[in-house]
Amino acid sequence: MEPIEFSALGIRLRLAPGDNPEMVRRIVEFVEKRIEDVSQAAPNAQPLQIALLTALNIAEQMYKEREQERAEYIKAVDKVRLMLHSLE
């Protein structure tokens, strides 16, 4: 399979598509969009600063999503426990 091209902040990468090239393409598009957003928000930032801010933004989003999933899981478990308790 052909490598997937990724270019950002003056750096070009060729990524192996792995078992799921469509997912790799979606991730590349996601990261490119995030880099573009950070670049526009901080037009005077150096490429390394943009890369680090982008990484922090993506990590923050991932962390928040995991915390939300965890809270929803705990809520569901508590609901099941209440239902089981009411059957006793």
Image (cartoon, rainbow, N blue to C red):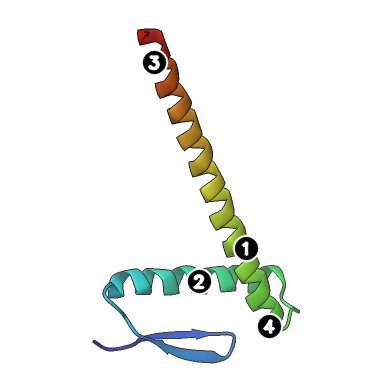
Residue lying farthest to the right in this orientation: 44
Q: Which residue is mark 2?
A: 31
Helix, strand or loop at mark 2: helix
Sooner in the amino-acid sequence: mark 4 or mark 1:
4
User: Helix, strand, or loop for circle 1?
Assistant: helix
Residue count near mark 2 (Cα–Cα under 10 Å), binned few <14, some 14–19, many ≥20: some
Query: How far from the left and from the top, in percent, is residue 14?
Result: 41, 89
Residue hosting label 4: 48
Chain-order first, disc 2 or disc 3? 2
- Residue extending farthest to the front is 88
For residue 68, which numbered disc appears in the image? none
Q: Quadrant of the C terminus?
A: top left
Above or below, 43 relative to 4: above
At horizontal 44% and vertical 84% (from top left) the residue drawn is: 6
Calculate the distance from the C-alpha at mark 3 to the C-alpha at mark 4: 52 Å
Q: Which residue is mark 1?
A: 57
Say which label, 3 or 4, has the lower sequence index: 4
